[in-house]
Image: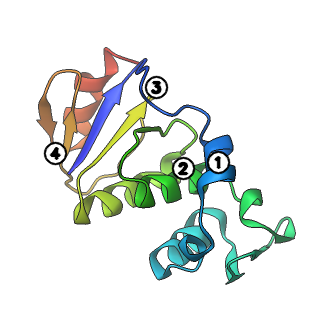
Amino acid sequence: MLSIFYGDMPEAVYNTAAYFKYDYEDDWITDPFVKEMILDVDKSTVLDSGVIDSPVLGKIPPLGLSGGVKTLILIKFNHSKIFNASTCGDNCARWLLKIAEKEDRTINLRHLLRFGDEPFTIRILNTGQIVHSTKELVPAAGEFV
């Protein structure tokens, strides 16, 4: 299940780009799930662990990925940290849910992310409430962002 704490969370990693720079591992980039995420969110193709083909930027290293994708990768592979996912746009929301399908994940957000129209299950840590739709999420999380 995906758990979200909205607002200031001192233990969360806020500078996900810097954390990614020093923490990511080459095999994370070639993971099939990550390759699919990169293609969907950044519209880029992983050629190998050190080269990604971006339609906008050309050939880039993993450090050239968007902040949202870097944050998603950290959330997927680093289970011991809570990451601030405010670098993630709405195009990352479904991936957060997919990551949390396999293993529980906790993230921090400082904005409302649109998780779409399909039913989902998210625990709002600020209140302990579990929500299953955007209609339930917005009023429950809105008071904290």
According to the picture, the residue beneath numbered tag 3 turns out to be 110
- Which of discs 3 and 4 lies nearer the camera? The answer is 3
- Numbered disc in front, either 1 or 4: 1
Determine the CA span between mark 3 and mark 1. 15 Å
**x and y percentages locating residue 16 in the rendered image:** 59, 41
Say few, some or many: other residues with alpha carbon within 10 Å of mark 4 (under 14 / 14 to 19 / 20 or more).
some
Three-letter code, disc 3: Arg
Q: Which mark is residue 41?
A: none
Q: Residue furthest bottom?
A: 47
Quadrant assignment for the C terminus: top left
The secondary element bearing badge 1 is classed as helix
Badge 3 density bin: few <14, some 14–19, many ≥20, Cα 10 Å: some
Q: Is residue 1 left or right of residue 42?
A: left
Nearest to viewer (mark 2 / mark 3): 2
Image disc number at residue 67: 1
Q: Earlier in the sequence, mark 3 or mark 4?
A: 3
